[in-house]
Image (tube, rainbow, N blue to C red):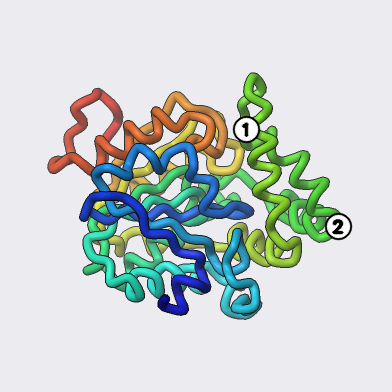
Amino acid sequence: MHPILIRNNVKVLGEGSQVIMFAHGFGCAQSSWKYMTDAFLKDYKVILFDYVGSGDSDLSQYDKLKYSTLEGYACDVIDIIEAVDLHDVIFVGHSVSSMIGMIAALQIPERFKKLVFIGPSPRYLNDGEYIGGFNVGDLENIFEMIADDYVVWSKQLAPVVMDTPLKPELSDFLQECFEATDPSVALAFAMATFKADYRDKLKDLEVPSLTLQSSNDIIAPLSAGEFINKNTPENFLVVMKATGHFPHISAPEETIREIKEFIGSKTSLSTSGHLYAS
């Protein structure tokens, strides 16, 4: 087996030939896609993986310097694509993986077919008229809480970002995902995530993309999704009925439907009445 497949705990599943690659967000692992993957196995080649430092990846390969920026995580994506020799990749990234996927697509655009951003943000920090949702004090508080007691922070965060009070088991699942991550790795990933600013890179993206924006997402507000839509060529925006930052867990049916409609479409026109505007 190729060492990259071991390093990133890569799983290749499905009966189809069209590649669809799912990339998890901060504090999670490939298990976070378990409510969605079955819907793609019949018609797609499904690629699942864990970033180094997450899930069942090889933690011995974790490099603090490399993974201090999102470019380091994008290297994982590119390494996997090259190791498995993937082409025409449909990349589905949750949260910070949206920008990680964009970074990879900017480096090797010929390998990508479409990108799907779930709850993306090009910058989490407010900046003048740009509303990312957080101020400097917010981010400092997040970093301090993770460093002080990651487990307690995870317990507090999970139900808020999941936003499914009638389904507490989903928050419990998310909390378990968070707690499986080494606290020092989680802190470094959080800092790489929340300090990033990729607003000026959006204009260079050549690969068609979809922004799936949840309602009432305190991590990635609508303003962030709208900024991506307005500043990215061939980006289409859908505001979902789903609430919270994890619609692939809380509302998998709606998320699957929107992804399949986008990746199956050959035009920029929506057939369902959703907002597909570039």
Q: Quadrant of the N terminus?
A: bottom left
Q: Is residue 260 left or right of residue 11?
A: left
Task: Write the residue at 40% across / 66% down.
Answer: 103
In the image, 79 versus 142, the foreground residue is 79
Marks 2 and 1, how far apart at CA: 25 Å
Secondary element at image label 2: helix
Residue 14 is situated, as x and y percent measured from the top left of the image, at 31, 50
Question: What's the mark number on residue 170?
Answer: 1
Q: Provide the residue designation for mark 2.
A: 148
Q: Is residue 143 left or right of residue 46?
A: right
- The amino acid marked with disc number 2 is Asp
Residue 33 is situated, as x and y percent measured from the top left of the image, at 48, 45
Task: Write the residue at 41% across / 53% down.
Answer: 22
Question: What's the mark number on residue 22?
Answer: none
In the image, 72 versus 131, the foreground residue is 72
Task: Write the residue at 73% across / 49% down.
Answer: 138
Task: Write the residue at 38% across / 50% down.
Answer: 92
Choose mark 2 or mark 1, whichever is in front: 1
- The amino acid marked with disc number 1 is Leu
Residue 47 is situated, as x and y percent measured from the top left of the image, at 38, 57
Q: Quadrant of the C terminus?
A: top left
